[in-house]
Amino acid sequence: MLSRYAPWFAGEDALRPLLPLYWLFDAPARPVGPAVDILEKDDGLEILCDVPGSRPEDVSVTLENGVLIIHARRTVDHAGAAVHRAERHQGEHTRAFTLGEAYDGDSVSATLQDGVLAVKVAKRPEAAPRKIPVRFAADAADKQLGA
């Protein structure tokens, strides 16, 4: 069984019954910024990023030194109205992802549809999986002896 490493609280198992609010400390951390799904497919990587309410001109995708950066801005205009409650988020968020050497930074494409930004990065041809033939060791020895 895997467990989360929490170096700041080494005796957590012994003290768990004593902490009625333990769940506050054990909650998984949420990233600051738009939620993303990262999918690895045969032809490359696809990053789906939620940017609801953002216009295409308010979303940018950049690649710098192997780091893919997604930046989105959302503004909510309440001009001329008395605001009684404002719960919808407005502001700017940035997410950054380091691409491995298996991905081609020159083939990045991004599309925005229905509040979801889809960023696709193709794999390099040399990083594509290839089948390695396996020979029987006796066959290799016979070929060396007969040569």
Image: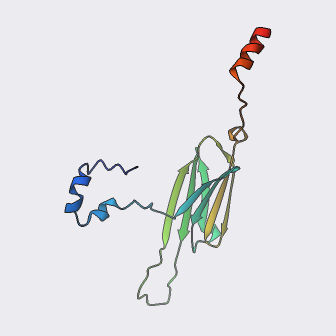
**Residue 74 location (% of width, % of height):** 54, 72
**Residue 39 location (% of width, % of height):** 61, 56
Q: How many marks?
A: 0
Q: Nearer the viewer, residue 76 or 28?
A: 28
- Residue pictured at 77% horizontal, 14% vertical: 143
| The C terminus: image quadrant | top right
Q: Nearer the viewer, residue 76 or 122?
A: 122
Q: As drawn, which residue projects farthest toward the right?
A: 147
Displayed quadrant of residue 119: bottom right
**Residue 90 location (% of width, % of height):** 48, 73
Residue 147 appears in the figure: no
Question: Is residue 136 rendered to the left or right of residue 75?
Answer: right
**Residue 107 location (% of width, % of height):** 71, 50
Residue 80 appears in the figure: yes
Displayed quadrant of residue 60: bottom right
- Residue pictured at 44% horizontal, 90% vertical: 82
Q: As drawn, which residue projects farthest toward the front?
A: 138
Q: Nearer the viewer, residue 105 or 42?
A: 42
Q: Is residue 130 shown above or below 35?
A: above
Q: Nearer the viewer, residue 145 or 23?
A: 145
- Residue pictured at 50% horizontal, 85% vertical: 79
Q: According to the image, what is the colour scheme of the structure?
A: rainbow
Question: Is residue 59 rendered to the left or right of residue 4?
Answer: right
Q: Is residue 115 shown above or below 30?
A: below
